[in-house]
Image: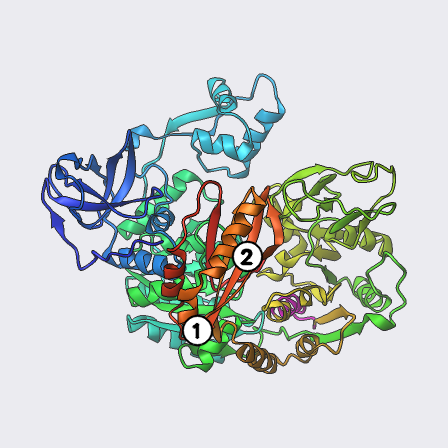
Amino acid sequence: MADTHDDQDGPGWFDEGALVAVLTAQPLDRTLDYRAPEGGCAAGAFVEVPLGPRRVLGVVWGPGLGDFDAAKVRSVHKVLDVPPMTEEMRIFLGRAADYTLTPLPAMLRLATRAPGLGDGPAMRRVFARGLAEPDRMTDARARVLDVLDEQEDAVFTQKELADLAGVSGGVVKGLAAQGVIEERAAPRDLPFPQLDPDLPGKALTDDQAAAAGTLAEGVAARSYATTMLRGVTGSGKTEVYLEAVAACLRAGRQALVLLPEIALTAEFLDRVEQRFGARPAEWHSGVTMTERRRVWRMIGQGNAQLVVGARSALFLPYRDLGLIVVDEEHDTSYKQEDGVLYSARDMAVLRAAIAGAQVVLASATPSLETWANVEAGKYRALSLTSRFGPARMPEMRAIDMRSEDLPGGRWISPSLKAEVEARLERGEQSLLFLNRRGYAPVTICRACGHQVGCDHCDARMVEHRFLKRLVCHQCGETKPVPEVCPACEVEGKLAAVGPGVERMGEEAAAVFPDARVEVLSSDMYSSARALKARIAAIAEGEADIVIGTQLVAKGHNFPKLTLVGVIDADLGLQGSDLRAAERTFQLMRQVAGRAGRAEAPGTALLQTFQPEHPVIRAIVAGDEDGFWSAEAAERRAAGVPPYGRMAGIVLSAPDVQAVFDLGADMARRDGPLRRIGAQLFGPAPAPIARIRGRHRVRLLVKADKAAPLQAALSDWLRQFRWKGDIRVSVDIDPQSFY
């Protein structure tokens, strides 16, 4: 459990030889005592300390505890040449650890994800594309050159380049020896160019200008508040919150914009550059190690005014954070589902409250949590009611599949076909949306009924015809599509069942033989750059029909797109997820919002076997407030989030008996939970009961909204000691229940 002793009562200085408590990112449950080095050190200083035979990175967390043999206390090896961690950041990490029930060292790992912080510049060597060509080309060498060509101006460490290309370090060294790759000293970490908040932005409508003015006033007040910025897709939310960024820059404070997808980053960076005259700092998994270290250092020195990034950008060392924008705040990718389990939306609010900063939660379809906080008066609400310029909201209609004459193995109804053909005649684009990657979700044997599953997970393997393989979407395992059934060994009886986007692409090409059909799915492109280039080409009109997964629902603007057809609007309504209705509503509204974003009006058609379902009716009617009110009433009656507290506990191990025994023991000794009135459900096999060869058992804890859930969970879990290969993960406010 998190070590929460709080030695954060203000900055302190420790003279040489004084006992200091150092928090390392190593998997320990406490700080360690060391003696301050020659010259002393400050609270928050980043230091290198001896731990066993190694030297590890740590942060001076406060005065030493003195609970260790003083004669054995070793000295801090050196203080790193980076700005100390602020008291505000140490408080944030401590509170985040307490809230998520995460050990503090794991939180520190999130805050120190910059390589080579302790290295002097002379120690860093990087590689870039050289002038020579290889004496002979191999597959491995070609992959290295592809990585270098993809990010033309980037430089990579040897390990990073080898890992990205999937080759050994020897391949990189061999290319360097021939001059194909150039080895050089790492560039000095330079400040980011100044952004100019006073450059003219786009002309705003009256409601945009009013919303931007309200946000700018909040930023100027230098105090904490959270605002929900709601506006229909295409209403100009980005322009509005960029004006809040401008106000933050004028106040001399730093701003952070979180985006849900790396694929959206490049387009957004172009918009920032148009507005402020320079590009901001980027932070996401596509950024090179060298650039990541530069971003981390420049933010800590105050030499990066604006950061655009993924959820982990919340843990960067801002000197004076004045604004956090969470764009598409409802998006499920803001929940970290492995390692430290946290919601970036919740952590943004926590960080801003500590920093005295403003939070903007922007979405066309806000989460029910955000909606409930507005209703309760905790958050402000700003609404943009009309689309920007000539664009209008699309007409929404349901296609009742029960009355459509559709042959088996086909999914495009005659009604939808007719609408697509009308668009083709007018030279407009259509989007056929299906939230299933791959060719088919199940491969079944027509002789014995066996469904081909993953060898390491209790999950069906998905056929990806584009890759010519079966893929497990849980662990990533792949294998060729078998000729013979693995169960009954009958040949030629394996069949793909149900549609994925690749299969929809085949059907669309057959139904519309003269149309240019493009399948957009993240796993069909070798890189984010290739995907971005294809999206740009489609926006220019290089496709007539786009087949896409939820990737296309997020942030992309296709001016010629006037029809959206949702192939299976019922898909998200199945299953036991308490947020199924909410997610379906959000996704359908987001997808529909892709239509009619320019002069031509748009239409969105939902193919459904349940046209009378309340969610489908609310989507078609556009009755957002009615939907939220009904959904809120159901959740309130059930006492589930956001009107109750929940925690998911997943136990996993290679030995199924060991996890069930531990789960049963935990269920028997649930006194600390009962004392706060919480209910414990389980143990039961998790919906996906085996992943990567590990058996998974789940327990769910449900409590009242005001119950002290974290404290009770800590007391309950403290009773148990798990040994060997058993892992226990605790997820406060779980978003998925697999």
Please tell me the numbered disc located at residue 698.
2
Q: Can residue 244 be seen in this view?
A: yes
Image side of residue 23 versus residue 632, left or right: left
Image quadrant in which the C terminus is located: bottom right
Callout 1 amino acid: Gly
Check disc 2: other Cα within 10 Å, few if <14, some if 14-19, many if 20+.
Answer: many
What's drawn in magenta, residue-wise?
586-601
Q: Can residue 255 be seen in this view?
A: no
Comparing 445 with 480, the one in front is 445
Q: In this view, does 724 lie above or below 712?
A: above
Check disc 1: other Cα within 10 Å, few if <14, some if 14-19, many if 20+.
Answer: some
Q: Foreground mark, 1 or 2? A: 1
Image side of residue 239 versus residue 315, left or right: right
Comparing 139 with 270, the one in front is 139
Asked if the magenta segment contains residue 595, the reply would be: yes
Please tell me the numbered disc located at residue 677.
1
Callout 2 amino acid: Arg
Comparing 241 with 500, the one in front is 500
Q: Residue at x 65, y 63 (%)?
A: 559
Q: Is residue 119 above or below residue 93?
A: above
Q: Position of residue 203 (x, y in %)?
A: 48, 71
Q: Which residue is drawn at 82% across and 54% down?
A: 507
Cα distance, mark 1 to mark 2?
A: 20 Å
Q: Where is residue 337 in the image (x, y as percent from the top left)?
A: 51, 54
Nearer the N terminus, badge 1 or badge 2?
1
Comparing 459 with 368, the one in front is 459
Q: Which residue is drawn at 59% across and 49% down?
A: 532
Image side of residue 148 versus residue 307, left or right: right
Q: What element carries label 1?
A: loop
